């Protein structure tokens, strides 16, 4: 599984990357602090992104634009928006996201999101110990 993180705050990106690595030890996680670099990665078409966590508001390319492009190349990709406020939540659902996480993102919220994204998978090994 390839999980992509697009988060312009390096500290928040590292934390989310750590949570995802705990939940999916065998997954590939690629992280970008620059949304334009993430967009170029998507447009390369070389990789299938199974799940994308992206901040909504970023310099350059917004999370909305990023998810739109992602779905052009990977129609089955799941997307999760991350934001400081609920301000963009209604608009986010128009993009058929799996979840909308408010900062600060916690391990528990990531586990819940992963269970929503992949309901056939059970527990992730952390759901009980949280």
Image (cartoon, rainbow, N blue to C red):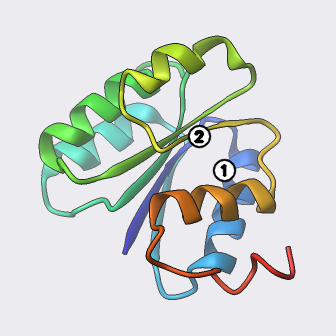
Q: Is residue 39 left or right of residue 27?
A: left
Q: Is residue 127 above or below residue 92?
A: below
Q: Position of residue 6 (x, y in %)?
A: 51, 43
Q: Is residue 130 found left or right of 45 in the rendered image?
A: right
Instruction: Tell me what residue is drawn at x 45 percent, y 25 percent.
Output: 93
Q: CA distance from mark 1 to mark 2?
A: 5 Å
Q: Badge 1 local density, few (<14 within 10 Å), some, or many (20+)?
A: many
Q: Position of residue 109 (x, y in %)?
A: 74, 54
Residue visible at 45% across and 28% down in the picture: 63
- Residue extending furthest right? 129
Q: Are marks 1 and 2 in contact (CB under 8 Å)?
A: yes
| Quarter of the rendering occupied by the N terminus | bottom left
Instruction: Give the total number of marks visible in the rendering.
Output: 2
Residue 17 in the image: x percent, y percent?
Answer: 64, 63
Q: Residues within 10 Å of mark 2 (few under 14, many from 20)?
A: many
Q: Which residue is mark 2?
A: 7
Q: Secondary structure at mark 2?
A: loop
Q: Is residue 65 left or right of residue 11?
A: left
Q: In this orientation, which residue lies closer to the viewer: 21 or 46?
A: 21
Q: Position of residue 98 (x, y in %)?
A: 47, 44
SS class, disc 1: helix
Q: Residue at x 69, y 46 (%)?
A: 10
Closer to us: 124 or 34: 124
For the C terminus, give its image quadrant. Answer: bottom right
Q: Quadrant of residue 127?
A: bottom right
To which residue does mark 1 refer?
13
Of callouts 1 and 2, the N-terminal one:
2
Q: Residue at x 48, y 23 (%)?
A: 92
The correct choice, above or below, for 119 with respect to 45 in the image is below
Q: Which disc, if any, is residue 67?
A: none
Quadrant for residue 120, please give it: bottom left
């Amino acid at each position: 599984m390839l999980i992509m993180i697009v988060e312009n705050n390096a500290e928040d990106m590292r934390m989310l990357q750590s949570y995802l690595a705990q939940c999916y030890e065998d997954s590939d996680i690629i992280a970008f602090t620059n949304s334009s670099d993430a967009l170029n990665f998507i447009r390369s078409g070389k990789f299938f992104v199974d799940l994308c966590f992206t901040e909504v508001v970023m310099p350059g390319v917004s999370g909305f634009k990023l998810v739109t492009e992602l779905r052009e190349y990977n129609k089955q990709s799941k997307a999760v928006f991350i934001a400081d406020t609920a301000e963009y939540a209604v608009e986010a659902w128009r993009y058929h996201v799996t979840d909308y996480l408010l900062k600060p993102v916690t391990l528990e919220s990531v586990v819940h999101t992963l269970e929503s994204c992949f309901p056939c998978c059970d527990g992730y090994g952390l759901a009980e110990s949280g």
